[in-house]
Image (tube, rainbow, N blue to C red):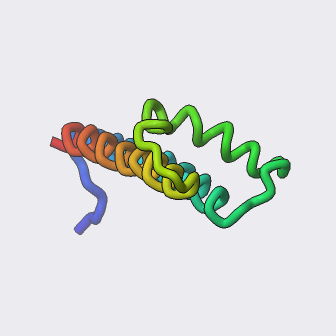
Amino acid sequence: MSRWRTGTRSGSYTAARVISGVGALFAIIEIVYILMIVLGANQANAFFSFVKSLAEPLALFFPGLFSFESYNLSIIINYGLAAVFWLVITGLIARLLAR
């Protein structure tokens, strides 16, 4: 018996997995940026600049949504919300595609 799926729906499952993977990648970028800020990474480093250049546009409208006295807490909450947003939205899209 073959273990490969056949039929027309297998393409939609593959697309759903790709969408979920993209959402997870976006969330990981946000989390890496949060960790680099909170742990005090050297902001003049090229890798930090690269991650920052990816994380800021992916955060959409979340930076500045909540402001706290602690800068680190503001980063954790705002960019953490952006990471959760990407996971939820891409999860919903993937679920719709898999139907």
- Asked if 3 appears above or below 80 in the picture, the reply is below
Q: Which residue is painted at 62% across and 62% down in the image?
A: 38
Q: Which residue is painted at 39% across and 48% down in the image?
A: 81
Regarding residue 22, the answer to whether it shows in the image is: no
Write down the quadrant of residue 95 in the picture.
Answer: top left
- Among all residues in the image, which is located at the extreme left? 99
Q: Is residue 25 left or right of residue 90?
A: right
State the image coordinates of residue 86 (x, y, percent, origin top left). 39, 44
Q: Nearer the viewer, residue 53 or 90?
A: 53
Regarding residue 19, the answer to whether it shows in the image is: yes
Q: Nearer the viewer, residue 4 or 15?
A: 15
Number of marks drawn:
0
Q: Which residue is painted at 23% across and 38% down in the image?
A: 97
The N terminus is located in which quarter?
bottom left
Q: Is residue 87 left or right of residue 55?
A: left
The C terminus is located in which quarter?
top left
Q: Which residue is painted at 74% across and 60% down in the image?
A: 41
- Among all residues in the image, which is located at the extreme front? 69
Q: Nearer the viewer, residue 24 or 53?
A: 53
State the image coordinates of residue 64 (x, y, percent, origin top left). 48, 37
State the image coordinates of residue 37 (x, y, percent, origin top left). 65, 56
- Asked if 69 appears above or below 57 in the picture, the reply is below
State the image coordinates of residue 18 (x, y, percent, origin top left). 41, 45
Q: Is residue 37 left or right of residue 18?
A: right
